[in-house]
Image (cartoon, rainbow, N blue to C red):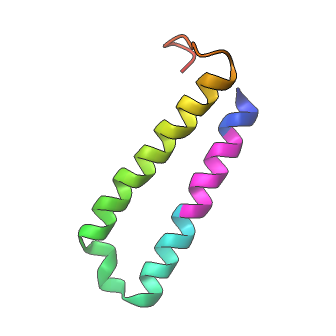
Amino acid sequence: MNNHAIKSGVIVGVISIVVTLLLYIVDPALLVSMWMFLLFFVFVGLVAYFGIQHRNEIGGYMDFGKA
């Protein structure tokens, strides 16, 4: 579980850093626009995707406490 969580966290973190830096380079005003609000939902979706992927890898079932 820890190995999967670390791998998923690094992927989401790197994507977040790259997107934020690109937005800052293009126009710093974009960091306070609706784009960041939409990106938040993209990142929440990525976390949900990685959680579902992990659940499927371990057999399709995971206790709520472990999740």
The residue at the point 62 percent across, 24 percent down is: 56
The x and y percentages for residue 67 are: 54, 21
Q: Position of residue 38 (x, y in %)?
A: 30, 60
Is-magenta flag for residue 8? yes
Q: What residue is at 60 percent from the left and 32 percent from the top?
A: 53
Locate the N terminus and report the quarter of the image it occupies.
top right
> Relative to 42, is 31 above or below?
below
Q: How many marks?
A: 0
- Would you say the magenta stretch is mainly helix, strand or loop? helix
Q: Name which residue lies at 34% across and 75% down.
A: 31
Instruction: Using the image as rendered, state which of residue 58 and residue 27 is in the foreground.
Output: 58
Would residue 6 be found to the left or right of residue 31 on screen?
Answer: right
Say if the magenta span includes residue 36.
Answer: no
Residue 28, given in percent of the width and then of the height, sits at 36, 85
Per the rendered image, the range of residues in magenta is: 6-15
Which residue is pictured at 62% across the width and 62% down the height?
Answer: 14
Nearest to the observer: residue 49 or residue 23: 49
Q: Is residue 1 above or below residue 11?
A: above
48, 10: nearer the viewer: 48
Q: Quadrant of residue 3?
A: top right
> Is residue 12 found left or right of 10 in the rendered image?
left
